[in-house]
Image (cartoon, rainbow, N blue to C red):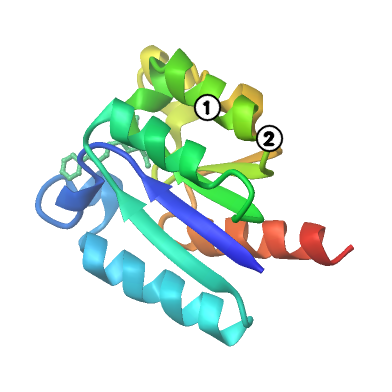
Amino acid sequence: MKILIINGPNLNMLGIREPDIYGKNTYDDLCALIRAHAAEKGIDAELYQSNHEGDLVDKIQSAYGNIDGIVINPGAYTHTSVAILDALKAVAIPAVEVHISDVDSREEFRQISYVRLACIATISGHGFDGYLEAVDLLSERHES
Ligand code: CA2
């Protein structure tokens, strides 16, 4: 099984500021955690991060026909991007939305998610572990 893990804008800055919200570990730590978990489960994990909406759309489109599941934290684009929503709908690959922080208990604008409309589940507020839970969810669904 092949899973694509996509992170959107500013997630490459993890660990640098706002440790009270996003923790003190870095984006590289996150990648290492996901890679180790996927390897343990025999899953092929591809990781991608971009600060640019169009690049995120291109990456989702490139998954068509060769990826079994998508884990996506679109960062701030979660709350604004119909383009990312449409790309996920277009490829029709099972996708799970992940947020490190609990977006539903933060500012009102973070409680809106366009991307959620194309996802089979949302995992929010579980820190880095949320990505691992998303991988497990997609893997269990793929096996059944
Ligand atoms: O909780 C999440 O995972 C978010 O998707 C993170 C986004 C935010 O815009 C979403 O509302 C919720 C922010 C990405 C990281 O932003 C940083 C800001 C300062 C220092 C380090 C990272």
Mark carried by residue 87: 1
Give residue 27's position: percent from left, percent from top. Answer: 24, 60
In this picture, residue 20 sits left or right of residue 2: left
**Residue in the foreground of this view, choosing between 102 and 67:** 67
Q: Residue at x 62, y 27 (%)?
A: 90
Q: Residue at x 54, y 73 (%)?
A: 44
In this picture, residue 32 sits left or right of residue 98: left
Q: Amino acid at mark 1?
A: Ala
In this picture, residue 8 sits left or right of residue 100: left
Residue extending farthest right: 144
Q: Residue at x 38, y 60 (%)?
A: 47
Q: Real-space Cα distance between discs 1 and 2? A: 8 Å
Mark carried by residue 92: 2
Q: Is residue 25 visible?
A: no
**Residue in the foreground of this view, choosing between 118 and 67:** 67
Given contact means CB atoms under 8 Å apart, are the residues at marks 1 and 2 in contact?
no
